[in-house]
Each structure stands twice: as structure tokens, then as C-alpha cells.
Amino acid sequence: MRKIFINKLVKEASKNKKIVLIVGDLGFGVVEPFKDRYPNRFFNAGVAEQNMAGIAAGLAMKGFHVFIYSIANFPTFRCAEQIRNDIDYHNLSVTIVSVGSGLGYGNLGYSHHAIQDYALMRSFPNTLIASPSNNQEVEASVDYLLKNPQPSYLRLDKSLELDVNKKIKFIYPGKWIFYNNSKKKTKNLILSTGSVYKECEKLLNKNYDWATIPMWGMKYKSQQIKNLKKYKEVITVENHLQDGGFGSWISESLTRNKIKANIKILSKFLDNKVIGKVGSEEFLNSNYGIK
């Protein structure tokens, strides 16, 4: 997803002179196409993520759409106060790009596990979460963010590059993207967000619909949630811990919108026993992955 994002940003930056990319001394081997083509709009803030967020806020106040880019928890938890006070509360056009969703950087240790980031980022009232599941959702997400500048969080998989046989013209907050519509009038649904496409395929059977919600957040709880009323059983899937995650957001959304339908929510998420563990992404997912 990293290369898909950078290639898309390079293309859009040729049309939008206000796009700026800041990295936290990471991403090399990926970000060079932007750096080489737009050197005056590329900055390396060094290992100083709080400063990176502050610079982004300042540039955004001058009319730029700033993308700050780093691994997993570094552009989120490490500078949470700056995101809250400077970016979110001032409603600025800064997109925080986190690479290595879930356990993507598992072999670098639990400091690199992005397994609580939904909980943090969705607590900021003005921040939109964009968590695509494939290449097409990445590009459509970037399109929306550029056309609707706002505080946003773009959560990317480290290595997944997945093309799906589906054209996605546009995405907006709360929109469902269906990847399976059962021919039967099913009452069962798989609803996912983020890079869990393959995990959902394993769960899928002919009696289930399957859709993703690539964009969501605190102030978008009412959008499209009414679609759940037609289902009796909903399985939510995410590569995140249970607390504060996507499944929690769905349950809260039902309560907030006073939907009294008898819906059974089954959540699939990472096992919290993964905390403190180190190993390859494959090893960690096989032992502590989505259950």
C-alpha cells in the first residue's frame, strides 16, 4: 500500500501545488518519487515526531494540505498531544499517514505494533479515519481526503498490494463497499475495515454478505449505520485490539442511533496476549491473530 499511496500522491501533487509531504526520517526506498519530483514540498523532520506534527499544523494554517508519514505508532501515539491540540482542535488539513497496520512490523518489537491506534485516533472529534483494504480503496481514500481537507488518519498496510476486480469511483465517510452480495436474501453480514481482506475471504460463505467501511470516525456514527437493520448477525473484522476498535465503533453507533433491531454483533480482532510479543508478522498473526 505504501507505493500505491506515494504514486497517487505524486500524481495529485502535479495538479495541487498545496500538497506537502513530511517524513520522520523514515520511508526511504518508498518516498523518493515524491522527494525527487517535488523537493520544495518534501521535508524530513528527523526523529522528532512532535515537531513534525507542529510543522504540519503551521503549514496547514497557511493553506497547505500536509501529509505526515511514519511507521505505526510514531506519527500517532508519540505526538498525540500535538495532533489533538494543534491539528484536530483547529480542524486543519493534515493527513497522518501510518504504515504497518496491525502487526506489520512485528519483528521490530511491540513498540511498532499498530494495534491500539484506532482507539487513539477516533477519540479526536474532528479526525476522519481512512483504513483501506486494497489498492483501489487507497486511491479512492486519497481522492476524498484531497477534495475534503480536514484532520485525517490514513492507515496503510506495510507490504500488502492487493488489486481487486472492482472499480471504486468514490468513497465517503460511512460508505459501504460490497465485495460479496449473497444471491439469497441473507440476514448475515461480514463488515470490515483495514487490511483484513484475506481474513474476510476465509470467513466468507454463501450465506453472508461482505462489505468494508474504509472511512469512519467519531462524528460519522450516523452515516450508513441504518443499513445494519436488515441483518440479524454481523461479524466485524479488524487487525486491532478489541477496546476502542472498529467493532466497538459499530456497537456504539447502533446505540447512538437508537437502533433497536435485534442484531447480534460478533467481533473478530487481535488477541491482547500479543502485547509484549516479538516475531514476524506471520508468526504473530498465526498465534495471536484475528480470532
Image: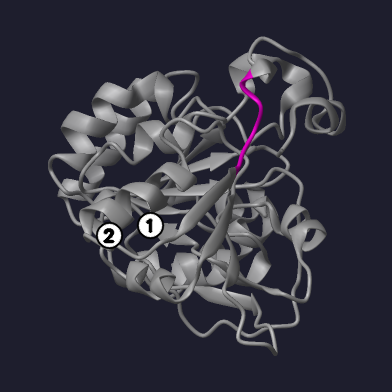
Within 10 angstroms of label 1, few (less than 14), some, or many (20 or more) residues? many
State the residue at coordinates (72%, 75%).
207
Asked if the residue under mark 2 is in contact with the one under mark 1, i.e. CB atoms within 8 Å, the reply is yes
Residue assigned mark 1? 216
The answer to which of 99 and 261 lies nearer the viewer is 261
User: For the N terminus, which image quadrant?
Assistant: bottom right
Residue at x-position 54% and y-position 75%: 177
Q: For the magenta stretch, what is the residue range?
A: 268-272
> In the rendered image, which quarter contains the C terminus?
top right
The residue nearer to you, when weighing 110 against 60, is 110
> Considering the numbered disc 1 on the image, is that residue within a helix, a strand or a loop?
strand
Q: Residues within 10 Å of mark 2 (few under 14, many from 20)?
A: some
Residues under labels 1 and 2: Cα distance?
6 Å
Nearest the camera: 168 or 253? 253
Quadrant of res 18: bottom left
Give the number of the disc on residue 198.
none
Q: Main secondary structure of the magenta part?
A: loop
Q: Residue furthest front?
A: 262
Q: Amino acid at mark 2?
A: Tyr
Please state the horizontal and vertical placement of residue 258, each as a whole percent of the image.
21, 60
274 magenta-colored: no
Q: Which mark is residue 220?
A: 2
User: Mark 1: which amino acid?
Assistant: Trp
